Every structure is written in C-alpha cells, then in structure tokens.
Image: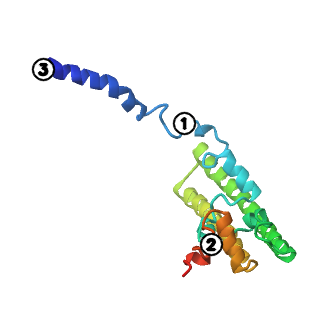
Amino acid sequence: MSHMLATLVLSIILIGPSLAQHGHGSGSPYAGLERRAVKALSSDEIADLRAGRGMGLALAAELNGYPGPVHVLEHAGSLALSGEQRARVQALYEAMRAEAIPLGERLIGEETHLDRLFAERTVTADSLARATAGIGATQAALRQAHLKYHLATMDVLTPAQIERYGVLRGYAGEAGGHQPGGRAKH
C-alpha cells in the first residue's frame, strides 16, 4: 500500500503544475488582450484594414485559381504582362483599395463602438443586435470587395498567365494541373 501511496504522491507532484496552468489566471489565451484599443482587433489587423489589405478574405478565390491584383502586380515580370494588362490590373488594384479602405475604417469604427458599449456597461440586447448586424454587413461588404477584384482580374489575364500565376504562388506544379475555378487539367 505504501508503494501505491508513493505513486499517487509522485503523480500529484508531477501532474499538479500542469493542471494548474490550464485553469484560471496567467494561462488564459486572452491575457494581455484587455489592453488593446479595440478588443476584437489586433494592431496588425487594424493596420491591414486601414491599408486595404486582404487579410485572407479572398482565399476562396485565390486558392481556386482566381489571381488577385496585388499578387499579379508583384509577379508582373514573370507573368509577362503587357503594358495594357499592367495598367488594367493596376486600375483594379487601386479600385479595390478605394473600396476596401473605407470599409476597413467603418469596420474599425463599428468594432470600437461595440467595445465601448461593453466597456461603458451600456450594452443592451437591442444595441448588441444592431452593432453586430452592422459589423456583419461591413465584413460581408469588405470580403465581397476583395473577392470581386479577383474575379475581375480573370478578364485581364490569359489562361497561360493564370496557370503561370498558380505556379508562381505555389499552388500548381510546372506541368499544370490547376485550372481557374478549381478544374483539373485532363
């Protein structure tokens, strides 16, 4: 029986600290986030929203063979864009930013408002519903803004350039196999 007791004591000594870390206190994954200006957004996310960056909002397009204007411009030389193509993609990029930046600012404002409702303890069921509905609508508009410019970029590039883009971005091998819209080459 003393062997069992010794094993139990040893188990408590070894496992106890590990269990304590998973409880309350310093082990919280949110520790430190309470100091954020806008609790729901990191400083990097705020910077991305203010700059009109995609933040992964267009992955449905990007990873299914619909190139994004910013990445097409980054690979303009390797894609052998003509002057006209480069100008058209640049115009798409500028239009996307002109649409996305105000939406990003609106989202920051809406998240700030929601945060303030909770911080000031003035939130109600109705104000919560209105605030989150506004945030959701802005998030949807922002995502659409990014996705539609991927779609528009398809009209500027040739099929060979689209295939090359997939290779350059690491989504397809040199021999192909990835076609716009996710269709495999036969």
User: Could you say where residue 140 lies in the image, as x and y percent from the top left?
Assistant: 62, 67
Quarter of the figure that contains the C terminus? bottom right
Question: Which residue is labeled 3 in the image?
Answer: 1
Q: Is residue 33 above or below residue 134?
A: above
Q: Which percent across, then down, holds residue 27?
A: 47, 34
Picture layout, residue 146 above or below residue 26? below
- Label 2, secondary structure: give it: loop
Viewer-proximal residue among 27 and 72: 72
**Residue furthest toward the left?**
1
Is residue 94 found left or right of 31 in the rendered image? right
Q: Helix or strand or loop: what does disc 3 sit on?
A: loop
Q: Nearer the viewer, residue 185 or 121?
A: 185
- In primary-sequence order, the first of circles 2 and 1 is 1
Q: At label 3, which amino acid type do we have?
A: Met
Identify the residue position indicated by label 1 in the image.
31
Q: Is residue 141 visible?
A: no
Question: Which residue type does callout 2 highlight?
Answer: Gly
Viewer-nearest residue: 148 or 186: 186
Amino acid type, label 1: Ala
Q: Which residue is mark 2?
A: 65
* Callout 2 touching callout 1 (CB < 8 Å): no
